[in-house]
Amino acid sequence: MTGAIDVVRLHLLDRRLVLGTLLGVLVFVAFGVAVTAADVAAGGSFGKGFAIGIIGGLYGGIAGAQATAMSRLLPFTVAMGRTRRDYYLGTVLFVVLEALVLGALLLLSLVVEQVTGGWGADLRFVEQGWESVGNPVGQFLVFAAPLLLTFPAVLLGVVLFVRWGVSGLVVGAVLAGAVAFAVIIVTGLLTVGSTIPVADTVRLAAIGVVFAAAGWFVVRRAPL
Amino acid sequence: MSVTTAGLTRHYGPVRALDGVDVTLADGVVHGLLGASGAGKTTLLRILAGQEFPSAGTVTGTGGGVCLVREDQTYPDTYRVAHALRAAALLQPHWSAEVARELVTAFGLPLDRRVAKLSRGMRSMLGATVGIASRAPLTLLDEPYLGLDAGSRATLSRALLADYAEHPRTIVLSSHLIDEVADLLEHVVVLDRGRVVLDDDVDALRGRAVTVSGPVAAVEGFVAGAGELHREQLGPTLRVTAVGTPDAVPAGLEVTPVSLQQLIVHTASAPDAHREETR
């Protein structure tokens, strides 16, 4: 476990990247609020689809921004005498930690939006994009759960790339995406284009766990 | 830390990067892993560090702590020199911050510059700093002199020897520039097309082969029955590099010792039967 904790510290080592990620969330929220303001000014109402689109970009963008660092740190960590298991466990811990922090940051944004009466102009971007739960813990889970899906998905993509290059990444992404999409459609887990229901956050995180487990089976025999 | 490989083989499709490699890297010795580009040096180092898996064969004895600095070591794009050093310090339990600081100063490494923006030579300096300051029981340096100017090469050699003298450990220097590392080595393993063609202590090797030159007939007579590694003839003068020659040198022949570089070059290109005589 000590090795995994060292890898978590390794991911946190570049403070500019860590702070930049946090700042990225705030930039996304600010962008969402600005789009909301523009939409309201133009049409008098704000479409939910805009909010969901921006939020999808937020989750995907934040996770994708870490992909390069994750892929580069794997061979470095092993070259420095640590195991693939140390790297993978540490990286999974890091992304869980990051999902929780970013979820808390989004919750804070919601609180600010509500306290300021919609950023001082009745602009309800954060409230529109996510389902409103009414209690802080449930709301926090709604904010964090998509990251517990997207981060492991990106991590799986990273190890597919490390092991099999671009072709592995493309084939893996298509297969994983098709399976995830089929599961979502068949089980009625999500309705595409709608907010994420609270009850589904656990299932989203469960898909993330499947991705994370699949990633381990890829990385444990990956040449670096 | 003593490391042993047995029958180590790694093939990529039809290409055999390593082919039945049996070597023992003794504890507390500076080893040279030498050979031409593509001989299998980096593949062997990657397997020793656990970055690569063998197709067949075994490696034993690498459990006590490894530091591999590859020629093409990658760092996250956002990493600066200071980040790379702090990352290595975090992962290497025997890390010496003092040695790292001294080498950064000696090399003039800019701590705040992105690693991706470093020149080839500066990347080698950073790698050498990581490798030496790690004080890992098994330190593997892949082409550490690549791109270094003469002054930096001397700095690296001095620092490596000084720290090794105080903290002996198993060090493997991989290089195709044999002259650059020859003075540091106590033992050499030479690879050629994935196979070990030479594996011996440097002191034993230095006196083993000689170059004989003189009239063709006299040289032919002198080297008859010896293991011939190389020959070149210029008019009436024949020049032969051989092992196992007689001690008594006939008049008219000139016998000179062979440098490590010459011995390795000749051994790698010699017929298999004669290679065996150098081992």
Image (cartoon, coloured by chain):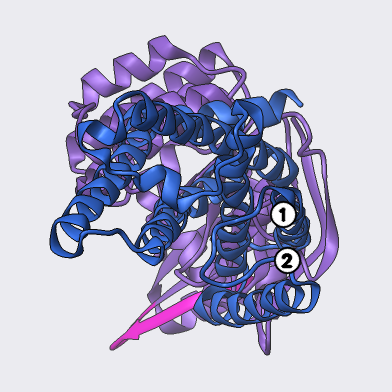
Chain colours: A blue, B purple
Badge 2 crowding class, 10 Å Cα cut-off, few under 14, some 14 to 19, many 20 or more, is some
Q: Is residue B147 above or below residue A183?
A: above
- The spot of residue B32 in percent (x, y) is 54, 46
Where is B108 relative to A71, above or below? above
Marks 2, 1 in one chain: yes
Is residue B232 one of those drawn in magenta?
yes
The residue tagged 2 is A189
The x and y percentages for residue B271 are 62, 82
Seen in the image, is A122 located left or right of residue A72?
left
Region of the chain picked out in magenta, as a range: B226-238
Quadrant containing the N terminus of chain B is top right
Q: Judge by depth and name the residue closer to the eye, A40 or B17.
A: A40
B211 in the magenta segment: no
The x, y position of residue B69, in whole percent, is 48, 43
Q: Magenta region's main secondary structure?
A: strand
Disc 2 chain ID: A
**Residue B129 visible in the picture:** no
Foreground residue among A196 and A88: A196
Q: Is residue B152 left or right of residue B171?
A: left
Residue A47 x/y as whole percent: 34, 63
| Left or right side of B155 for B14 | right
Q: Are marks 2 and 1 in contact (CB under 8 Å)?
A: yes
**How many numbered marks, from 0 up?**
2
Quarter of the C terminus of chain B within the rendering: bottom right
Q: Is residue B38 left or right of residue A124?
A: right
Residue drawn 85% across the image and 56% down it: B58
Q: Is residue A212 visible?
A: yes
Which of the two discs, 2 and 1, labels the residue nearer the N terminus?
Answer: 2
Secondary structure of the residue carrying numbered label 2: loop
Residue B258 versus residue B122: which sits nearer the camera?
Answer: B122
Residue drawn where x is 20% and y is 49% of the image: A34
Q: Amino acid at mark 2?
A: Leu
